[in-house]
Image (cartoon, rainbow, N blue to C red):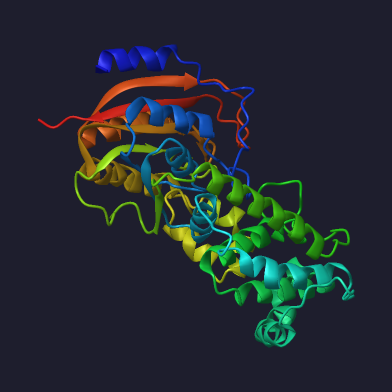
Amino acid sequence: MTNEELCTVIQKYNWEFTEANTQYLTHNIHRYSGKFIPQIAGKAIDLLTEPNDLILDSYMGSGTTLLEAMLRGRNSVGIDLNPLAVLISRVKTTIVSSDDIVEIYSELLPFVNYLASGGQLSLMSQPFDEDKINEQIEKNNWRIVDEWHCKWYQTDVLKQLVQIYSCIEIIENEKAKNIALVAFSDILRKSSNASSKYPNVMYDKNAKKKPLPAKPFLESLNNVVEAVKALSYKMENKSCRAGIIMQNNLALSIDSESVDAIISHPPYIAAVPYAEYGSLSLTWLGFDCKALDGELTGGRRHSTQVVSRFSGDYKQYFFESFRVLKPNKYMFLMVGNPTAHGARIELNEMTETYAKDAGFLHIATAIRHGQNRRGNKMGDEYLMFFQKVCK
């Protein structure tokens, strides 16, 4: 397909996907703000790549592009600095066997069912290693008196969260442990004293009594397990896989001219504070969300330098993307125009300028007018196509 033909297809295609199901397979295993609509990523993959190509998403987020690449027989690699994004993406693209999740059924489920039943064992109850779990609980009991944990979780809720988390920690199979951690992370906000009125994590001093987390965790765990199993069945006899790396996308550990396409959804400067939104999960997992916020492109949203910091990182991103992309191959980005400190940022224009500065040829831009669900009402989204042209 020539660039002229590609441009025609892009402009004529309906990118709205108003009635599309965006929650299939593992796409809905965990809440993640500013997610890429899978149908958009999928269509970009169809237009710009061939089977067995290698696709890069170096603003990976929760791994939407990677999953869509797998489903289409493409290999992929995702890059992100956010440990929560890395965890979700790993589980979202995980292929499991029955052996991989046996520890969930043999240890975790029996123990959490025991908690959910109020500590009652019946003749039908499956055994679990109570001594091993209690030993791990002792190591985590510091959380019960820790100031941060006591602020965000009511005492009885916190005690049960510690029990569940401790049981997850002793799981030896990495795939099984990650599945359980995603389910655990998924219930942390609803179990907390955070207000439900805002997307960011704000303490609600009038929070009502929260239900104990064992039953919500069991429901979340079942949903994640079933989604991962469905994906594994779908991918049976297919060899394409997703690689996930936690690193800065301004200095990629990827060979020059090794990638067949770049398909990504850059952050909206200060509009979606990923570290802040994931602060409860990140803290439970042992990460410093404030330190992470200082490293992320578009982080420190309250800083007066947030736009200039974003701009500098974003410009470098295009030069690094140009380096790893093969000659004559394509890059697709979807961006919106957010507001930072009261001023509208024309991110689409910034994207086109920086891409050209790095050496990319702008092929086409399609505009998506769909309803925006991201708090600051950015309105239109710009689906931008570029080609690496080597002189």
Q: Nearer the viewer, residue 47 or 365?
A: 47
Q: Residue at x 61, y 53 (%)?
A: 277
x, y percent for residue 275 = 54, 56
165 displayed left or right of 246 = right
**Above/below status of 215 relative to 345:** below
Q: Residue at x 29, y 54 (%)?
A: 252
x, y percent for residue 314 = 35, 44
326 displayed left or right of 199 = left
Q: Nearer the viewer, residue 24 or 138?
A: 24
Rendering quarter of residue 374: top right
Residue 89 makes an appearance in the image: yes
x, y percent for residue 167 = 68, 75
x, y percent for residue 129 = 71, 82
Rendering quarter of residue 327: top left
Q: Quadrant of the C terminus?
A: top left
Q: Residue at x 36, y 32 (%)?
A: 332
